[in-house]
Image (cartoon, rainbow, N blue to C red):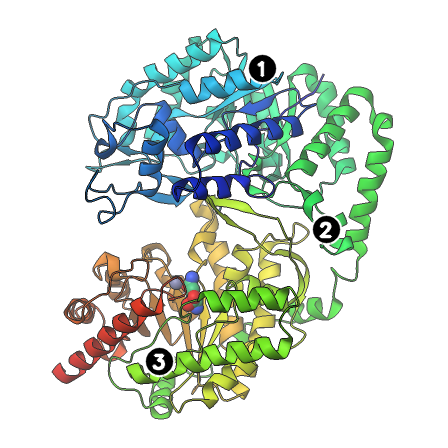
């Protein structure tokens, strides 16, 4: 009989209870006991929500991050936090968040936080394990065993979840850059001990996550996998080797060979590999198929799934398990909280709780026949049919426009050199022109005005007045600072993607659709459900107003199509590339409207372009092709004398230089201050032909950079890029900073530019 199980449940809580408990504890407003209590309640509630499944994950709950949990379980604490006298949970938070040197001068002297990075291709960030060549591991199974006994008491059929040794080591960093896999020898005995401890508690199955299996593996990594699972094969628990986020591809034969009791495959991405996996796996192995999408928010097509699964169930019998494709960590908790969502759209969606309902229906159908779930299947079919045929989803005019796209739409009229001359004549900028990335501090007053406006307490007219007052203030400040290209400051934007999504046709917004990004931080991605169009101009009035206040160029400020796409929940009924082209056409309209309104400089932010890179290198070209094409469609319809800027807030460009050059923006501003301008080497080697604004001041820190520091950074930049193509600007937007930090920092920045001009 088919078994159903889950790989992980969102831990943040339907109302973000964990977030508030954590932040309250960190601020000293709640006791540790209260925090622990919230954790225990959430675990209970989430286990109850998973009742009816044959196996329920335990250990997936975390106070910060599952990788950091693993580091603590394996006794791998960075040297700087070892020997801490206080509570272990506090030490855990010290690694997670760091402690500032100033605030802790009297006690511990402060501690640097662990580095944080993206978990595969998701928007979740984990704390990177740190190793040295002589790291020792010692087992600390307390957290896992405690959660296990809690689950047992609650009558839960528990399946502990851990991260596998090869993924754990591969995602870590060795201080001296040696190979972390060399630590396997020391690490595996601790894993063996952990499995032994679980076996002693009567655990039958352990889910061991090795998502590294969906990436391009080196020979060393492959050998490490063989060696690890050969070493752990004698353990008394059964291992479910779990891959997710992609296909196994070349790694499939390896996976099929490993001596584990079962294998989980992500069938959203790798359904084409199921047959081969079944064929290769020895006949006593369990095959867990991840058939419900753990990364999106759409209902599954249950009838189609059953058409596919019924013969497999007949063939595999007890060996067939069903699950979501990956942990449900990456979707919101419960659609039932959404009382204000458009009824049509709502009927097409499934969040974590609803996805488990789908799983239960599949399980029941396979065990007792489809007749046992007739009503559920009928309802599911009806919802899918309504989505398939809804005029809200399908807009023939948009489809026609995308079908008619021609490469010429993405071409500027003249090459960069010719444009640069026309723009210089129009804009009359000095050498080393200064500008900012767009946002200025989002003050409490701004946020309050927005809240009141949304709650209907502030009229549209008064809200506009309040925002215009902010814009006017921003412009006055920038003029006083003698910046060269001004911005309006983005006070009217809650978020650079949500703001545009709210004004585009084809987007919906949830109230509680939060997904953990890292620690207590969550994002609420907008839901792109239909063909995208722009009913009216979005930013033009704000930009026109801001420009009316100054004779200096006022930069129009937009979010690019790739970033809007990558930070949304997207459609599963058409390729991402198609959705991106629709967004590109809509945003192109906005660019052209800004130009018509007399805006001479337009910035199109592509903050998330790089993070959309696929996990497999073989897929990069295709992604970059359509991503760059989309940007070009958005940006390049303007006349030569309109200057296009783009901004990217990260500092790795080596792999994507050609794509960046193909975007052909007149000016690109990037994050560089923390890399000491070394990242400009990539631009130098590539002989990047257009203008560059390497960030000279780290906006993530409250420190006020001094003039000499910034002059020095620009000198380094000028060794790599000809000075006449350099701009001077901060690393990113200033919205998270306070005015008392921003004003002196920008004053120093402008003084640095003036010093450079005087010296040249
Ligand atoms: N224009 C945006 C801002 O200044 C850019 C933000 C970003 O790149 N993340 O806030
Ligand atoms: Zn940025």
Viewer can see residue 163: yes
Which element type, helix, strand or loop, lies under badge 2? loop
Of 240 and 230, which appears nearest the observer? 240
Q: Earlier in the sequence, mark 3 or mark 2?
A: 2
Q: Tell me if residue 291 comes above or below residue 742 in the rendering.
A: above
Q: Quadrant of the C terminus?
A: bottom left
Which element type, helix, strand or loop, lies under badge 1? helix
Horizontal and vertical percent for residue 424? 33, 88
Q: Are marks 3 and 2 in contact (CB under 8 Å)?
A: no
The quadrant of the picture showing ligand 1 is: bottom left
Q: How many marks?
A: 3
Q: Are marks 1 and 2 in contact (CB under 8 Å)?
A: no
Crowding near the residue tagged with mark 2, few <14, some 14–19, many ≥20 C-alpha atoms within 10 Å: few
Q: Earlier in the sequence, mark 1 or mark 2?
A: 1
Crowding near the residue tagged with mark 3, few <14, some 14–19, many ≥20 C-alpha atoms within 10 Å: some
Tell me how far mark 1 sits from mark 2, CA to CA. Answer: 34 Å
Q: Tell me if residue 127 comes above or below residue 559 in the rendering.
A: above
Residue located beneath label 1 in the image: 153
Residue located beneath label 3 in the image: 477
Crowding near the residue tagged with mark 1, few <14, some 14–19, many ≥20 C-alpha atoms within 10 Å: few
Q: Quadrant of residue 695?
A: bottom left
Q: Mark number for residue 378?
A: none
Tell me how far mark 3 sits from mark 2, CA to CA. Answer: 43 Å
Viewer can see residue 236: no
Of 338 and 640, which appears nearest the observer? 338
Residue located beneath label 2 in the image: 339
Q: Tell me if residue 647 comes above or below residue 350 in the rendering.
A: below
Horizontal and vertical percent for residue 301? 74, 40
């Amino acid at each position: 009989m088919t078994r159903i199980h889950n790989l992980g449940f969102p831990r943040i809580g339907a109302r973000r209870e964990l977030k508030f408990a954590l932040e309250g504890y960190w601020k000293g407003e709640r006791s540790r006991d209260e925090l622990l209590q919230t954790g225990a309640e959430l675990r209970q509630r989430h286990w109850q929500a998973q009742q009816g499944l044959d196996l329920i994950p335990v250990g997936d709950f975390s106070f910060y991050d599952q990788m950091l949990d693993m580091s603590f379980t394996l006794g791998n604490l960075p040297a700087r936090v070892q020997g801490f006298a206080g509570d272990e949970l506090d030490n855990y938070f010290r690694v997670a968040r760091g402690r500032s040197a100033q605030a802790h001068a009297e006690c511990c002297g402060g501690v640097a936080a662990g580095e944080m990075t993206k978990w595969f291709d998701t928007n979740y960030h984990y704390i990177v394990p740190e190793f040295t060549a002589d790291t020792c591991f010692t087992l600390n199974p307390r957290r896992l065993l405690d959660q296990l006994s809690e689950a047992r008491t609650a009558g839960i059929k528990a399946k502990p979840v851990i991260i596998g040794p090869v993924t754990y080591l591969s995602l870590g960093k060795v201080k001296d850059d040696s190979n972390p896999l060399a630590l396997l020898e020391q690490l595996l005995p601790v894993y063996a001990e952990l499995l032994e401890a679980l076996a002693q508690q009567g655990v039958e199955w352990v889910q061991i996550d090795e998502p590294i299996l969906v990436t391009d593996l080196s020979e060393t990594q492959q050998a490490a996998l063989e060696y690890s699972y050969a070493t752990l094969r004698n353990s008394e628990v059964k291992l479910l080797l779990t891959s997710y986020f992609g296909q196994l591809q070349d790694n499939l034969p390896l996976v099929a060979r490993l001596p584990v009791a079962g294998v989980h495959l992500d069938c959203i991405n790798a359904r084409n590999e199921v047959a081969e996996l079944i064929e290769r796996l020895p006949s006593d192995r369990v095959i867990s198929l991840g058939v419900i999408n753990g990364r999106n928010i759409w209902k599954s097509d249950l009838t189609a799934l059953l058409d596919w699964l019924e013969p497999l169930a007949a063939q595999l019998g007890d060996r067939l398990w069903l699950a979501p494709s990956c942990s449900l960590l990456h979707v919101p908790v419960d659609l039932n909280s959404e009382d204000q969502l458009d009824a049509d759209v709502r009927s097409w969606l499934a969040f974590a709780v609803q996805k488990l309902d789908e799983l239960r229906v599949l399980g029941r159908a396979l065990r007792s026949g489809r007749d046992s779930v007739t009503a559920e299947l009928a309802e599911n079919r009806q919802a899918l049919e309504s989505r398939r045929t809804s005029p809200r989803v399908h807009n023939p005019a948009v489809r026609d426009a995308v079908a008619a796209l021609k490469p010429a739409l993405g071409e500027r009229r003249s090459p960069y050199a010719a444009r640069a001359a026309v723009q210089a004549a129009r804009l009359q900028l000095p050498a080393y022109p200064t500008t900012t990335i767009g946002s200025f501090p989002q003050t409490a007053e701004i946020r309050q005005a927005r809240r009141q406006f949304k709650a209907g307490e502030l009229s549209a007219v008064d809200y506009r007045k309040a925002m215009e007052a902010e814009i006017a203030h921003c412009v006055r400040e920038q003029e006083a600072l003698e910046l060269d290209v001004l911005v309006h400051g983005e006070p009217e934007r809650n978020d650079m993607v949500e703001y545009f999504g709210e004004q585009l046709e084809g987007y919906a917004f949830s109230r509680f659709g939060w997904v953990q990004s890292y620690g207590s931080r969550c994002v609420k991605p907008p839901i792109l459900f239909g063909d995208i169009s722009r009913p009216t101009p979005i930013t033009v009035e704000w930009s026109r107003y801001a420009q009316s206040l100054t004779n200096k160029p006022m930069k129009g400020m937009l979010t690019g199509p790739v970033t809007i796409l990558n930070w949304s929940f997207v459609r599963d009924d058409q390729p991402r590339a198609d959705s991106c082209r629709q967004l590109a056409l809509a945003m192109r309209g906005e660019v052209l409207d800004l130009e018509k309104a007399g805006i001479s400089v337009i910035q199109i932010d592509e903050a998330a372009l790089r993070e959309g890179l696929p996990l497999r290198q073989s897929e990069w070209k295709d992604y970059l092709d359509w991503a760059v094409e989309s940007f070009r469609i958005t940006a390049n319809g303007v006349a030569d004398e309109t200057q296009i800027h783009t901004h990217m807030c990260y500092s790795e460009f080596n792999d994507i230089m050609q794509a960046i050059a193909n975007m052909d923006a007149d000016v690109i501003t990037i994050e560089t201050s923390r890399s000491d301008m070394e990242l400009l080497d990539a631009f130098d080697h590539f002989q990047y032909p257009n203008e560059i604004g390497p960030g000279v001041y780290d906006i993530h820190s409250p420190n006020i950079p001094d003039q000499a520091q910034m002059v020095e950074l620009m000198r380094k930049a000028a060794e790599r890029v000809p000075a006449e193509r350099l701009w001077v600007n901060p690393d990113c937007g200033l919205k998270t900073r306070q005015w008392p930090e921003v004003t002196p920092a920008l004053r120093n920045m402008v003084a640095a530019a003036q010093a450079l001009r005087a010296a040249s």
